[in-house]
Every structure is written in C-alpha cells, then in structure tokens.
Image: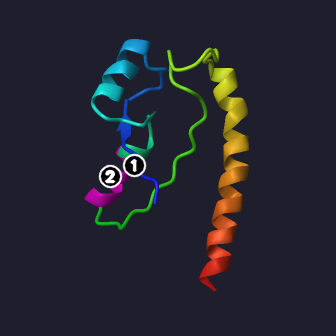
Amino acid sequence: MPHGIYAWYSGPSFETPAEIRALKILGSDAVGMSTVPEVILARFLGLRVAAISTITNMAAGMSAEKISHEHTKAMAPIGAAKLEKVLRRFLRDLT
C-alpha cells in the first residue's frame, strides 16, 4: 500500500520554495495547514480519528504551476468530487 509523510504548516499561506526544500529533506511528501491540528485536538478530546486530505496544488518551486488562492479554490471541488467517488466505493464495498 502506498504511504507518505504529511507535514503541517500553520497557514493560511503558501510555503516558500526554501520551506518546501527543507520539508523534502526532512522526508515530507505533502504539506497542509488544517488536518494535523484538527487531529491533535480530536485525539486530545479522546476521539478516534481517520483523516483524508485533498492536495489542491503543487508546492512552490516544485512545478511551473503558478500558485494562487484562486487556483487552490478552483481545485478544491475537483478533489472533493474524486474523494466522493473513493468514499462511495469504500462504503459500498463494506456491505
């Protein structure tokens, strides 16, 4: 099964190319700004947690893609539609 390391930055901001290089050196495969603190709080409250994050853009310096808030907002519903398909299939296979 594929796996990766998810890093967290507090946001809301885009990481700089230098920050992305540092995260890669530390072994990170993806970076986000909300999943980690949400999981920490849920665990603090005694909840069991499963988390799924949608990656909406390549990090600064990783592609020629221009990173912008508008692009991120445009990609979020596309990721949500893909996630919905995965979750529907998963839940269907449970029965």
In front of the other: 63 or 69 = 63
Q: What predominant SS class does the magenta segment belong to?
A: helix
Contact (Cβ within 8 Å) of mark 2 with mark 1 = yes
Distance Cα–Cα, label 2 vs label 1: 5 Å
Q: Is residue 11 above or below residue 16?
A: below
Does the stretch in magenta take in 43? yes
Q: Amino acid at mark 1?
A: Glu
**In the shown orientation, is residue 86 left or right of residue 50?**
right
Who's the residue at 42% across and 37% down the image?
29
The secondary element bearing badge 1 is classed as helix
**In the shown orientation, is residue 59 left or right of residue 20?**
right
Does the stretch in magenta take in 5? no
Image x and y of residue 45, in percent: 29, 61
Chain part drawn in magenta: 37-44
Who's the residue at 30% across and 59% down the image?
43
Q: Amino acid at mark 2?
A: Leu
Image x and y of residue 77, in percent: 72, 42
Badge 1 density bin: few <14, some 14–19, many ≥20, Cα 10 Å:
few
Q: Which residue is mark 1?
A: 38
The secondary element bearing badge 2 is classed as helix
Image x and y of residue 53, in percent: 52, 47
Residue 41 shows which numbered tag?
2
Give the quarter of the image for residue 76.
top right
State which quarter of the image contains the C terminus.
Answer: bottom right
